[in-house]
């Protein structure tokens, strides 16, 4: 579902222009060849389609690729850290965003 969501125009949740309100990216823990995957999109280029969704199929998990170190810190409370980066399926928020994009 993650890659399919890319094909219909959905970006990574952690690339949103407002992501700094929700996570703090830790570049020192991310391999250089993966840093671009954590870059923040410009608000000029991206239309936000809904609220930030930690559990979105489009969010990377906390452990960074290759290093396993935390790639970001969560800045909001009451978040199940084990569910961030899940690939079990679209969340209700993911579905709402797709509907808005194509309505």
Image: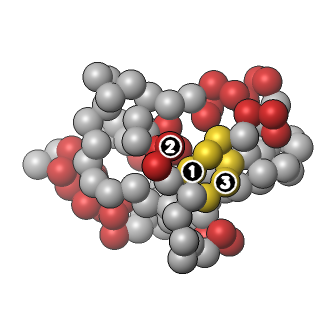
Do the residues under discs 1 and 3 have CB atoms within 8 angstroms?
A: yes
Badge number at residue 86: none
Do the residues under discs 2 and 3 have CB atoms within 8 angstroms?
A: no
Badge number at residue 20: 2
User: Which residue is at a point 50% across and 53% down the rendered structure image?
Assistant: 22
The local crowd at label 1, few if under 14, some if 14 to 19, many if 20 or more residues have their Cα within 10 Å, is some
Which comes sooner in the sequence, label 2 or label 3?
2
Do the residues under discs 1 and 2 have CB atoms within 8 angstroms?
A: yes
Badge number at residue 23: 1
x then y, percent, for residue 82 = 68, 71
x then y, percent, for residue 9 = 35, 36
Q: CA distance from mark 1 to mark 2?
A: 5 Å
- Residue 57 showing in the rendered view: no
Q: Which residue is mark 3?
A: 73
Residue 88 lies left or right of residue 66; in this view the side is left
In the picture, residue 62 is in which quadrant? bottom right
- Residue 86 showing in the rendered view: yes
**Please, what secondary structure does the residue beneath circle 3 have?**
strand
User: Which residue is at a point 60% across and 75% down the rendered structure image?
Assistant: 80
User: Which residue is at a point 50% across and 31% down the rendered structure image?
Assistant: 40
Q: Is residue 98 above or below residue 15?
A: below
The local crowd at label 2, few if under 14, some if 14 to 19, many if 20 or more residues have their Cα within 10 Å, is some
Q: Is residue 4 above or below residue 87?
A: above
In the picture, residue 77 is in which quadrant? bottom right
Q: Is residue 61 above or below residue 89?
A: above
Q: CA distance from mark 2 to mark 3?
A: 10 Å
Q: CA distance from mark 1 to mark 3?
A: 5 Å
């Amino acid at each position: 579902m993650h890659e399919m969501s890319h094909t219909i125009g959905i970006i990574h949740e952690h690339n949103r222009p407002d992501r700094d309100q929700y996570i703090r990216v830790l570049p020192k823990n991310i391999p250089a060849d993966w840093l671009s995957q954590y870059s923040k999109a410009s608000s000029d280029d991206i239309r936000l389609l809904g609220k930030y969704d930690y559990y979105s199929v489009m969010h990377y998990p906390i452990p960074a690729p290759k290093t396993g170190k935390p790639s970001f810190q969560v800045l909001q409370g009451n978040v199940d850290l084990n569910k961030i980066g899940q690939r079990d399926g679209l969340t209700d928020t993911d579905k709402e965003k797709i509907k808005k994009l194509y309505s």
